[in-house]
Each structure stands twice: as C-alpha cells, then as structure tokens.
Amino acid sequence: MAYSLLPGKHRLNLHASYAETGGKPVERTDLGPEHFARWIDWAKQSGLGMDFNPTFFSHPKANDGFTLSSRDESNRRFWVQHGIACRRIGAEIGRQLSTPCVTNVWIPDGFKDIPADRKGPREILRRSLDEIFAERFDTAHNLDAVEAKLFGIGSESYVVGSHEFYLGYAVANRERNILLCLDAGHFHPTEVISDKISSVLLFVNEILLHVSRGVRWDSDHVVLLTDELRAIGEELVRGDFLGRVHVGLDFFDASINRVAAWVIGTRAMIKSLLLALLEPADRLRALEAQGDFTARLALLEELKSMPAGAVWDMYCHRQSVPVGLAWLDRVKSYEKEVLSHRL
C-alpha cells in the first residue's frame, strides 16, 4: 500500500528476525535464504530490490549487552556465525533480484557505566568482523556495511562500535568495499551527518545512510523535510555522490498510522533530493570560486521561494501516484477497510 503512494522505485529492508520458519524454531545461526523465500518472491514480483540486517539483539545470548565483542567465546562464536549466515542470505537475495543487497551490521555492545578497558572489546570486535567478512561474495550480489552509534539505552558510557572504530575499519578494508553507515540519529543531538558525507567519501568507496529524525536522542521520529534533510540531499547532489550512496530510511512511530508514517517520511526524502536537483549547482559553485559570497547567499535564499512544489506535483502525476494530500484519503480508506479488521 505504501509503495503505491510513492513516486519512483524503491527497496525493502529486512532484519533477520523477519524470517519465516513455518512455526518451527530455527536458531539465528541456522537461518538461510529459504527462510526469506517468500519475501524474495514478493520483491521480485513487485520490482523491488532488498537489503538485509543481521539481528544482534532480542536474544538470550545478548542479555549481558555484548555480542560480537563478548568475552564469552561461545557467545561470540554464536554471533559470528549469525553474521556469516546473514551475509550468505544477503548474497542470495542480491543474486535472485539482480541488484546488490546491502547487508548492514549493527550491534548494541557497550557499557552502561564507565569502563576500565575500552580497548579490549574493540580488539575482540575487530577479530569478529574479520571472521564474518572472510568469505568473499560478488559485489554485484552483496555489499557489506558497518554502522556506528554514540550511545544507547544501557550503553550510555561506552559503545564498542563507535564512529571512529567503524570509520577506521571501513578505510582499512577499502579494497573489500566495506561501506560505512551514517545514521542521522547515532551522533550527538547537534551533530549532523550531512557534513560528514564528503569527508568520508574521500576515503571509502561507498556509504550507507540511515536517514532518521532524532528528537533529543535517537528517537527515530518520522522523517520530515527539515533543514538537515535538505542538507543531506544537497550534499548527495552537489558532490555527485548519488551513485556511491545507498539511502535507507530508519524511523517509526506507532502512535500514528504506519502506512502514513512510511509515506510521509519517504516522500520527504525524495523531496530533499528533488530540491537539490533543481538547484543551479554550477552557478553556485562558480560564485563561490569567484569569491562572490554575497551573490551566493542571495541566490541560496531566493531558491527557497522558487515553485518546487509545482515540479513535485508534476513528478507525482507522471509517476501515477496521488498528488498533494490525496494520498491521505487512500490511507484512511485502507485503514477503515483493511487495517481495522486485522487482529
């Protein structure tokens, strides 16, 4: 339903926890492509690509807050095997859909209070990642990504997989094309990922974005067309990075209609790209190179009142999706006729 209200082509991102096991218990280390066969078939029929995530949480072996950096070798091996299994699933997804599957690794590992040893867990994590990524896959089928975080609930004082750790790991493994994931909610509240994109892409081949909207913390509110979202779109277009950046959306809000949340957030991201594509980027760069910062600022401000909305409406019309708020009527009808009847 959500896809029918969105212009353009899109993808589907799944966690390993969405496996379909036919009601039978299957340990995460034993998951295989067969447990995602119906997802793959549906994506194929719908003309969608798919991306994938190992699920390193909501499991008894993650109860102490550590997975790939665990000092308990049996636990660490369990999670390494889960990561290996998920990369194989990702590669099979990409092979069947003829588009690379981005398989992204995020772990919750960290300490609630001040640690005595910051180095040790990171040495263990590096070893675990090396083991997970040891098997080579065709990059036409699978792309690996690693995702950092500043803090989490229960890991306020120390996160093993910090930004500096994963940036270093991605740069050190550039020949293997390890993507760095930048999540908009995984940094200090006043820190933005738009300013990181051009720096990171000088040293790694590709990156993954998790576009989110944090309110005071990593709250993953529904994405809106904020100044930061516009800045992200501008960086991707002005830097000619669209071919090197995989844009994922990372948000949820169970207090509103789920379909509406998807549509609002996804449309906002597309709008940010459209606004950037409509900019006279060459003229702006020329003014900057000439040192005419007055004209640069004046033009940037004038662009804000240009009729981009008319272009957006025409784009939606040509893509045969609802123009303006007409999509909301469809969502409300869907909620009444379909969602309200689900248990």
Image (cartoon, helix red, strand yellow):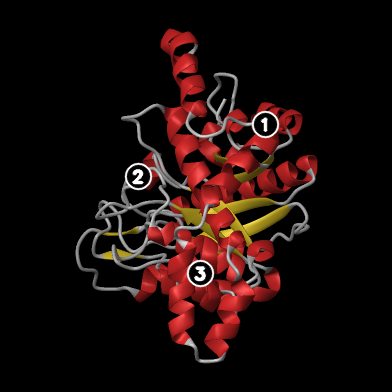
| Helix, strand or loop status at disc 1 | loop
Q: Amino acid at mark 2?
A: His
Residue to which mark 3 is pinned: 126
Q: Is residue 125 left or right of residue 103?
A: left
Residue 254 shows in the view: yes
Q: Amino acid at mark 1?
A: Ser
Residue drawn at 59 percent across, 26 percent down = 20
Rounded to the nearest angstrom, the CA distance separating label 2 from label 3 is: 32 Å
CB contact under 8 Å: marks 2 and 3: no
- Closer to us: 190 or 107: 190
Judge whether 161 appears above or below 202 on screen: above
The amino acid sitting under disc 3 is Arg
Mark with earlier residue (2, 1): 2
Q: Is residue 286 above or below residue 303?
A: below
Q: In whole angstroms, how far apart are the C-alphas of marks 3 and 1?
A: 48 Å
- Residue corresponding to mark 2: 221
Q: Residues within 10 Å of mark 1 (few under 14, many from 20)?
A: some
How far from the left and from the top, in percent, is residue 9?
Answer: 68, 42
* Quadrant assignment, res 14: top right
CA distance separating discs 2 and 1: 28 Å
- In primary-sequence order, the first of circles 3 and 1 is 3
Q: Position of residue 251 (x, y in %)?
A: 42, 44
In the rendered image, which quarter contains the C terminus? top left
